[in-house]
Image (cartoon, rainbow, N blue to C red):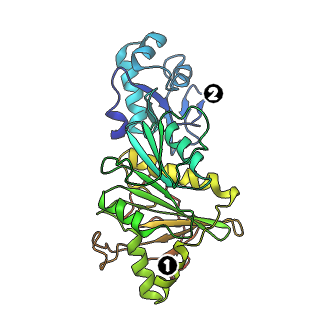
Amino acid sequence: MNDSVAGRLASGAHPRLLTGLPVLELRDGTVQIGCDADRGLRFGAGPTGLGRMLADLTGEYSLDDLTVRWNVTPGLVDNLVTTLARAGLLAVDDPQEGPLGGTRVARVVADTLLVPGLVAGLLEAGVGMVQVVAPGGYQDLGPGHDRVHCVDMLDRRPLPAGTPTVVASGCLEPDPALIEALMRADDPHVVLRPRPEGVLVGPFVVPGRTSCLTCGDLTRAARDASWVEQRAAMISSPAPYPPALREWATSMVMAQLSCWGRGGLPDLADRTVEMDTRAWRQTWRAWRPHPSCGCCWAPAGSPSGSRHAQTASVPARVPSSSTRPGSAQILSTASP
């Protein structure tokens, strides 16, 4: 059984079929769930109204509600939803909980036009409170944001260790002192950086478990002795986020945080993805932990900094998640 679903199939659970999953009633009396039998399920001729019963699995009704609504025994309901859960076709909705519903507080460190979208995404995902860290505060968040606290410094109102954080740098590279503070606090964080006509997202850093930004700097410095000088200049070089890519960048961040909030390791752990408005292609790069950094041990895998296509295969170290890019060969292992 799909453990993440099975553990929540109590009588008060609200099961639903995965979004967009069709229920097809065929002429021979069978009912198919899914676009094809290989990846879905096909039920033989069963009780009249099976299609209607399946159509009721919208997350609106609890198991107890469904038993009454269908006028069937609890055992039949349990058998149906258990079969669907084992096939990975069922989700369980808590009407009051989003993908980050168990996250009491999250942080956004930014002074860019991405802030409203990031804050709205976090609140809609169920985060209890969002702290926005921006010089001089950040007021352009719209009405009704009583769950948003704005401060001008990271340590102005300290949050618990382990607070998930989004860093949306207004310059080409983020302030290293900020990143160091997040590492010391064991705060998982995902970084956004503007690029010429583009956006660079990642890595998603879990202190002690995945590569950090310093790992990337050490890798690049080993290949280009001037990288330290370049980065110092980029830290103080403001750049805009292209309007056409702001929603893409925000959705990428929300996917990573939602995966983390559900107990997974996001796709951007040890990786970055970049897109620009010239080629409109995603470039994925793997960044292994650097042995000289000390944040964690570097596992075997793709060369650090290697580039991947828009649908590049996920390195073996990265667990599966709902956001994995797909499968294709690595285009190049050249340094970025």
Amino acid tagged 2: Arg
Q: Find residue 150 and report its horizontal and vertical position in percent.
A: 48, 45
Q: Find residue 182 and report its horizontal and vertical position in percent.
A: 36, 59
Relative to the observer, which residue lies in front, 212 or 315? Answer: 212
Earlier residue among tags 1 and 2: 2
Q: Find residue 195 and report its horizontal and vertical position in percent.
A: 61, 69
Amino acid tagged 1: Ala
| Furthest residue toward right | 278
Give the number of the disc on residue 27. 2
Which numbered disc, 1 or 2, marks the residue closer to the eye?
A: 1
The residue pinned by badge 1 equals 232
Q: Is residue 218 above or below residue 75?
A: below
Q: Which structural element holds mark 1? A: helix
Q: Residues within 10 Å of mark 1 (few under 14, many from 20)?
A: some
| Furthest residue toward bottom | 225
* 193 lies left or right of 240: left
| Furthest residue toward front | 136
